[in-house]
Amino acid sequence: MDIEVIVATHKPYKMPTDPMYVPLQVGAFGKKDIGFLRDNTGENISSLNPYFCELTGLFWAWKNLKADYIGLTHYRRHFKGKHSGSTKFDKVLSKQEAEALLEKIDVLLPKKRHYYIETIYSHYAHTHYERELIATRQILVEHYPDYVPSWDKVMKRRSAHMFNMCIMKKEKLDSYCSFIFDVLDRLNQKVNVSEYDDFQARLFGRISELLLDVWIDHNHIEYIEVPVIHMEPVNWWKKGTSFIKAKFFGKKYEGSF
């Protein structure tokens, strides 16, 4: 089974040794070469990385890789396999494990993140800007009206597949990427990113996380969820206090955790 999973990174970092993984320097346009493949080669949107985040890597993979199955992970986040080991990298999903799952189904996604006291919509509106949600829905109304019921359904949920991580059969990835990149391109024409700070300007990478479940729901896509392993500690205290400030005091997120 031909599987290629890009590992999006903007800096030198340890990578999984399994040959399924393809380290890719994202946002490589105008940046120093760090020794990996670069997302400013072939057909690409590398220059949009400050706003599209790891999606410039997904776009590059979609347009330039020819594997039967294509995926996206991050240098700090990977799919977790079932094998043990002395380091976190020993526990990253292997090609053998991926093949066993993909023989059953065409799409692998990370386990859902749960927002117990918030809906997907309210959490985004509190921590980022609601106008982006309003604009995205309007784009769907105008250009993808059949997707609007799924958007409304997903926005009312309290869990979602986040991180822009996936492994999909190429035909499924074609469908998914054709949808999200068209919507995001239209959103880019509506939003003036110069009005945002550097962190909030990465809105297209966040909206795409929401669009994944919209695409899944509308197209009745079957999938298997795989646990996620974080290669670095998550600052849960900072994350929790930042959420409280956003929800109750209108303080928008200022960075990742």
Image: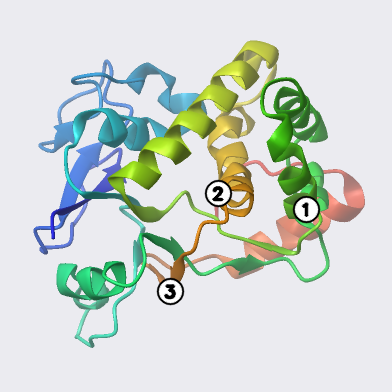
Q: What residue type is labelled 1?
A: Lys
Task: Report the residue marked by disc 1.
Answer: 153
Residue 30 spot, x, y in % from top left:
26, 15
Residue 91 spot, x, y in % from top left:
25, 78
Q: In the rendered image, which quarter contains the N terminus?
A: bottom left
Q: Nearer the viewer, residue 128 or 41?
A: 41
Q: Give the CA separation, mark 3 to mark 2.
A: 20 Å
Q: Which amino acid does label 2 sit on?
A: Ser
Task: Kindly check if marks 3 and 1 are in contact, taking CB atoms under 8 A apart as contact.
Answer: no
Tell me: residue 139, above or below residue 36.
Answer: above
Q: Which of 191 and 213 is in front in this view?
A: 213
First of labels 1, 2 by sequence position:
1
Task: Report the residue marked by disc 2.
Answer: 256
Q: Mark on residue 141?
A: none
Tell me: residue 41, above or below residue 22.
Answer: above
| SS category of the residue bearing label 1 | helix
- Occupied quadrant, residue 228: bottom left
Task: Report the residue marked by disc 3.
Answer: 227
